[in-house]
Amino acid sequence: MTALTHDHPWLALDLGAEMPVLSWAVNRPGLVRARRILWREVRNADLPVDLDVEAWLTGELAARDALDAVCFLTSCNIAQVCESRAEVDGIRARAVATVGLSNAEAVGTRLPPATDGWGTINIAVALSEGLTEGARIEALSITTQARTAALMQSGLRLSTGPVTGTGTDCIALAAPEGGTRYAGLHTATGEALGRAVLDAVTRGVVLWQQSDAAREARHG
């Protein structure tokens, strides 16, 4: 079983073996081979306006001997990580999500950037099924769809419309190389990963709402 470890301000998912990981993460975006996916929690003070964020993160990762990792950045509380697993027809999916919505957006519109932190949704998905490159892209789209479905089911709204994500969301999909060509909603792969992501993000939204309400109560 792959390990998930929290060592503030870091969260690490060990995939158990090096495999292809597809993402648009800050560190090592695109299709790369990696054994671990990391989260780095930040605060406003960590990221002044004139900071070269990529260079800063490279230094942080080098100090941790983790330049080989795919790495997310977020200002949400990574201690509130949500994990969910699903299995369909022997295909296993594991979703690990951190959910912050201070940077929320409604797709097709754009609000001024948040000034009180970059609380984003970062999701790592690990699949047992070996995928072709095309199936890997399709699986990433199903993961995105499940994230958006979780947000829309929450009923959260902005002045511009229903919340569909944040301005800085990121997803990393890890799966072995293999011959599975399709990972859509009609497949066991799509069902398993969709269910795992939907559950993890749904629970993450509830945790964020609870913590946001607590912050308002303290400062109200």
Image (spheres, rainbow, N blue to C red):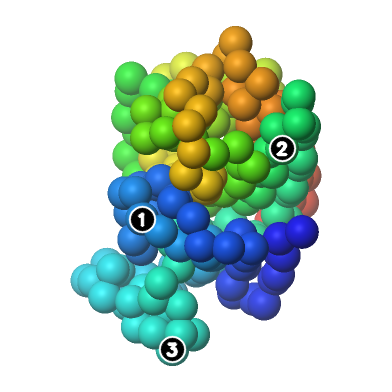
Q: Amino acid at mark 3?
A: Ala
Quadrant of the snapshot with the N terminus: bottom right
Q: Which mark is residue 32?
A: 1
Q: Position of residue 75 (x, y in %)?
A: 52, 60
Task: Say whether disc 2 or disc 3 marks the residue closer to the N-terminus.
Answer: 3
Q: Which mark is residue 122?
A: none
Are there few (<14), some (14-19), or many (20+) residues within 10 Å of tag 3?
few
Could you tell me how far apart the alpha carbons at marks 2 and 3 are, in whole angstroms?
34 Å
**Residue 89 shown left or right of residue 73 in the figure:** right
Task: Say whether disc 1 or disc 2 marks the residue closer to the N-terminus.
Answer: 1
Task: Say whether disc 1 or disc 3 marks the residue closer to the N-terminus.
Answer: 1
Q: Residue at x 41, y 59 (%)?
A: 33
Front disc: 2 or 3? 2
Q: Position of residue 6 (x, y in %)?
A: 69, 71
Q: Which residue is mark 3?
A: 63
Secondary structure at numbered mark 3: helix
Could you tell me how far apart the alpha carbons at marks 1 and 2 are, in whole angstroms?
21 Å
Could you tell me how far apart the alpha carbons at marks 1 and 3 are, in whole angstroms?
21 Å
Q: Which residue is mark 2?
A: 92
Are there few (<14), some (14-19), or many (20+) residues within 10 Å of tag 1?
some
Q: Nearer the viewer, residue 29 or 51?
A: 29
